[in-house]
Amino acid sequence: VTLIEEMHEAFAEAQFELYYQPQIDTRTPRLVGLEALLRWNHPTRGLLSPGSFIPVAETSGFVLEIEAWVLRQACQQMSAWRAQGFLGSATVGVNLSPLQFKTAEFEANILAALSDTGLPPRCLELEITERSVAGRPETVARLVERLTAKGIGFSIDDFGTGYSSLQYLKKLAVKKIKVAQGFVSDMMADPGDASIVRAIISLGQELGYQVIAEGVESEEQRDFLQDKGCFLFQGFLFGKPQPVSALTEQFRKGG
Ligand code: G
Ligand code: G
Ligand code: NA
């Protein structure tokens, strides 16, 4: 059996699951968002991360089916949490695969997922990577503009690790950048990474973007970032990616 065949089977047998990781604004301090992170409960190999199967799914177009499911599932879950009185104005972040931008149904699928689940567009944040922009910046810019006009938010994931130029990024209506985990994890030890992080934060400030740091694991990293003007965080220090049941329990307890 190939991995692709296994994935089709997994899909039919509901082996995919979304975990959610909190995003915190330390100024308030409040939970401002949750990133939906795909997991595959593989029958023999355990819990698999998307890095080990999304690239394979991307070679066949099957990724589109997976992503459509992820989007609906995330909107539905967020809507359910909101209906229980949790989460206030927090957003749910959904990762997009570059292939999605090539399909004619992309925009309609997103709008349908929102209207079918009753999730307000302002509660959805679509995470795009520089990989999605490369090659068709104008198409992506127009799509982002139309969906932004409807209230949907966008962020650029793993900022600074791709190949897109600032020229293209400037044309995007995206107002939020995510500082890649790799820079954050190395910045306390590597002056080069510290400079890059500082530069990304000031670029964001100058352009009026929100800047969120990923992979923040220690108080030392948090303090360094706050000192440079970054107050949005995602990382183990603030919470690990967790399944729905654990988070619901936490929300019930008011956490
Ligand atoms: O959760 P983990 O660290 O294993 O995620 C690895 C990578 O997979 C991250 O870069 C994350 O953005 C990406 N990822 C997580 N969930 C999804 C998803 O639903 N779709 C896509 N395309 N990528 C995802
Ligand atoms: O690129 P993206 O933001 O989608 O990556 C999120 C991934 O990073 C998730 O798979 C998550 O498990 C992982 N992750 C989140 N926070 C931390 C952290 O503080 N440390 C490490 N090592 N990984 C993290
Ligand atoms: Na992401």
Image (cartoon, rainbow, N blue to C red):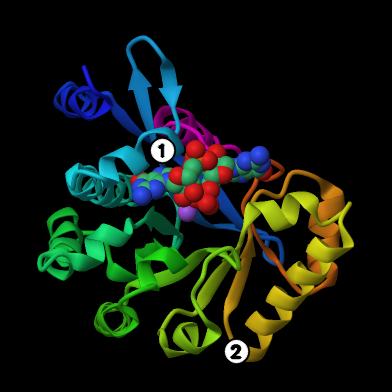
Cα distance in 3D space between marks 2 and 1: 32 Å
Q: Provide the residue designation for mark 2.
A: 207
In front of the other: 250 or 72: 72
What's the residue type where badge 1 is placed? Pro
Q: For the residue with label 1, is its CB less than 8 Å from the closest atom of ligand 1? A: yes
Residue placed most toward the observer, 54 or 198: 54
Q: Is residue 233 above or below residue 226?
A: above
* Left-right relation of 214 to 190: left
Task: Residue under label 1, please give it.
Answer: 50
Q: Position of residue 6 (x, y in %)?
A: 22, 22
The response on whether ligand 3 sits within 8 Å of label 2 is: no
Crowd class of label 1 (few under 14; some 14 to 19; many from 20; radius 10 Å)? some
Sequence-first disc among 2 and 1: 1
* 120 to the left or right of 26: left
Disc 2 versus disc 1: nearer the observer:
1
Callout 2: SS: helix
Q: Quadrant of the N terminus?
A: top left
Disc 2: CA contacts within 10 A as few (<14), some (14-19) or many (>=20):
few
Q: Is residue 245 magenta?
A: yes
Q: Is residue 184 magenta?
A: no
In this orientation, does residue 73 appear?
A: no
Instruction: Work out whether 144 lies above or below 100.
Output: below
Image position of 219 (left or right of 21): right
Q: Secondary structure at mark 1?
A: helix
Report the span colored magenta: 240-255
Pointer 2 and pointer 1: residues touching (CB < 8 Å)? no
Can you give x and y, in whole percent of width and height, for residue 74 in the image?
Answer: 31, 48
Q: Is residue 17 above or below residue 84?
A: above
Lateral position of residue 183 relative to residue 18, left or right: right
Give the quarter of the image for residue 73: top left
Q: Residue type at mark 2?
A: Leu
The structure residue drawn at horizontal position 37% and vertical position 55%, both measured from the top left corner, is 94
